[in-house]
Image: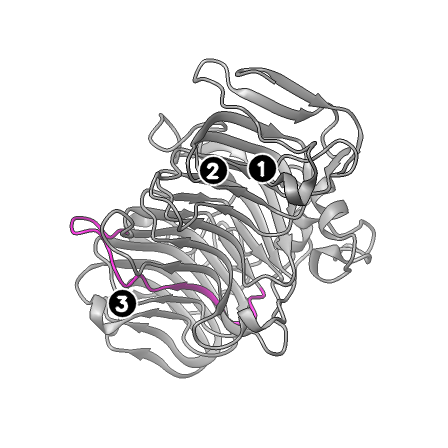
Amino acid sequence: MGSGGELILLDGSYTPGTTGVINWDTSRFSTNSAQIPSGSASKPTTVRALNPGKVTVQGPLFIGRSSRKDSYIKVQGITFEGGGDLYNTSFVTVKDTGFHGPFSIGTNDHNNGNTDNLVEDVWVWASGQRIIAINYRAHRNVWRRVVVRGDGCGTADCQGDGNPNVGFTVYDSQDVSVQNVLVVDRILAATDSPYSDFAIASHTGGQYSFGRNEWLGTISINAPDIGYYMEPDVGTTVDRTIKIDNAVAWNSAGGGFNIARSGSNISLSNLLAYTRADDGVRIAPELAGTGTLRNVVIRGGGRYGLNSSYVASNVNLNGTFQSAYNQTTPVNVVAGDPLSSGAIKYITRVESGSLLSAAGFGGSDLGPTILYRYGTDGTRHGQAGYNTLTSTKLWPWPNEARIKAEMCANTTRGFCSTGKRRDGVNPVTLTSYVWEAAGHPMPAEF
């Protein structure tokens, strides 16, 4: 292929021994294997399936080398057995693509950056891996409508306090926008060290400091540990933003949201936490005075319902916690059980006219609304509309038939169930699984 060319893959399975795969390592994947050449801003190099969902590459996608940045490339409609790595890239788009194996943007063995990439309508699932999806030392990237599931690790690399198991993490990175990402039904092996579905880490500083990252319309379902565990040690000297808006941690075995260690300009709003242990929402003492917390619904049991160094506003809290509040007491508390009252029938919205409707800050709903897509399709970080809430419906989830066929090939747990949804008639889909998590049949409109 030349720069700006297009390779269209016909239906079938592409293997190292026949066609080759998209990878630099010819010693491992045969001399047929190669990487995609860079394109240009006006004409990216494209590799796509003629019929999305009918093309499988039996090897991991790999773009870039430590000595070479590959840019302006688009990969679309393919399923990769073995995962993928945007190793040294800029302005790469991965669209409508599945990765059976870990997927990453970034690495720690060069300092050339991995910037301005877009991962849109992608699904990642893996076993034997400590981290399923990661944005590592890579800035100005957008992850939009990504489904992540970890199927347990069980190796020595996943054991001990220094080896936490995570679904999706932003690590040593700045200006990363995480939009409508789902981490669903992640599990741990008996020896795995627990951590969280969504995580942050930052230990390096300097060029790879943490800062200005956001999570918009994200959902954690059935975390075997904590829904969101954000603890960057090192941030930029100017702005160590953590923004989480319209987010759910549903049925977490541990806590719901845990924000700790380092940060400034932190903004947490419209959260729903349903936990079975630990704290519903925790803002660590060292973060006192660094941000805001409001429009929070907390349900379940554990240690503290709300354990916050911020004085939270517009809070609804119910459950069997040892104590409702710790550190501070919230203002504008709304009484009543949102589940038994029907205010929360679905984890994606607050019911109109309920006790939580218009009960939030400034007359907004108290709780999350995850009905529409964040970000205009195809936009990269900093482009017009890249992180705005659009009027395009999020549900039904795009590519969900492909997602179920591929992610459910070897399991029937969670949304992979072969049974019926709560109407007793229709099969379970990813959309119905999310919408019916709180026990009510999915609305007919979706």
Check if residue 92 falls in the magenta segment.
no
Nearer the observer, 312 or 361: 312
Label disc, if present, on residue 349 of the rendered structure: none
Q: Which residue is mark 3?
A: 261
Residue 313 location (% of width, % of height): 27, 62
Of label 1 and label 3, which has the lower sequence position? 1
Q: For mark 2, give the secondary structure.
A: loop
Total numbered labels placed on residues in the image: 3
Nearer the observer, 311 or 37: 37
Q: For mark 1, give the secondary structure.
A: loop
Residue appearing at x 77%, y 46% in the figure: 405
Q: For mark 3, give the secondary structure.
A: loop
Quarter of the rendering occupied by the N terminus: top right
**191 relative to 110 in the view: left or right:** right
| Above or below: residue 111 compared with residue 43 | below
Asked if one can make out residue 13 in the rendered structure from this viewpoint, the answer is yes
Residue type, label 1: Trp
| Above or below: residue 339 compared with residue 98 | below
Q: Which residue is mark 2?
A: 65
Of label 3 and label 2, which has the lower sequence position? 2
Magenta segment: 222-241
Residue type, label 3: Arg
**141 relative to 102 in the view: left or right:** left
Q: Residue furthest bottom?
A: 322
- Residues at badges 1 and 2 in contact (C-beta under 8 Å)? yes
How much space separates mark 3 and mark 2, taking CA atoms?
A: 34 Å
Dominant secondary structure of the magenta stretch?
A: loop
How much space separates mark 1 and mark 3, taking CA atoms?
A: 39 Å
Label disc, if present, on residue 24 of the rendered structure: 1
Of label 1 and label 2, which has the lower sequence position? 1
